[in-house]
Amino acid sequence: MTALAFQVVLDSADPHTLADWWGETLGWQVEPSDEGFIRRMIAEGYASETDTKLHRGTLVWVEGQAIRQPDAPEGSPCARILFMAVPEAKAGKNRMHIDVRATLDGADLDQARDALLARGASLLWEAAQGPHRWYTMADPEGNEFCLT
């Protein structure tokens, strides 16, 4: 079977703000908006002004925003996270979550936790298995992730 590329999609109340937060957290790039394309889609009747908004002075689609790993080849597995607008609030525990591996480059786990808390994350609990410990946290919209 051929290898399949994929992206992770997170439901969001405000996809652009959450993409900004996760982009900064992971050191990934927020994909740029193509304002010319958006305006052309409106002019040709494929979209309306209500499908767009201004985010940080840039015309964007209301429904979503993606981030990607810097310098990742197109189609790389899991090189992209897409944040999609949904009308309902998050309810219940995530069935799947992101693991953020802060200690890969020698970073201090507690310092990484504190930096994320200062940027709007919340701490849900701390856990350990043998010598390995991690924090389960939530992003500003309540999506759980683990910090290891």
Image (cartoon, rainbow, N blue to C red):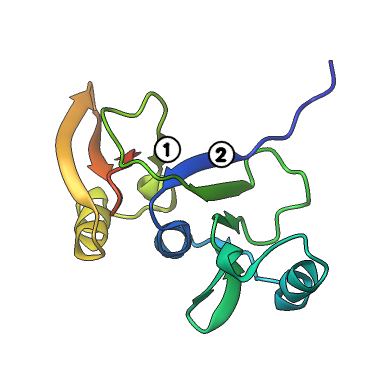
**Residue found at x 23% / y 21%:** 130
Circle 2 is placed at which residue position?
A: 8
Foreground pick, 90 / 88: 88
Q: From what the image shows, is residue 145 above or below residue 49?
A: above
Residues at discs 1 and 2 in contact (Cβ within 8 Å): yes
Relative to 23, is 33 on the left or the right? right
Whether residue 140 is visible, yes or no, is: yes
Q: From what the image shows, is residue 90 above or below residue 113?
A: above
The x, y position of residue 48, in whole percent, is: 66, 66
Report the quarter where the C terminus lies. Answer: top left
The x, y position of residue 24, in whole percent, is: 43, 65
The x, y position of residue 49, in whole percent, is: 61, 71
**Residue found at x 40% / y 44%:** 100
Circle 1 is placed at which residue position?
A: 98
Q: Amino acid at mark 1?
A: Ile
Foreground pick, 6 / 136: 6
**Residue found at x 24% / y 37%:** 136
Report the quarter where the N terminus lies. Answer: top right
> What kind of element bears circle 2?
strand
Whether residue 147 is visible, yes or no, is: no
The x, y position of residue 131, in whole percent, is: 24, 27
Label 2 Cα neighbours within 10 Å, binned few <14 / some 14-19 / many ≥20: some
Q: From what the image shows, is residue 127 above or below residue 40?
A: above
> What kind of element bears circle 1?
strand
Specify the quadrant of the image occupied by residue 117: bottom left
Lower position in the chain sequence, tag 1 or tag 2: 2
Foreground pick, 137 / 89: 89
**Residue found at x 20% / y 65%:** 118
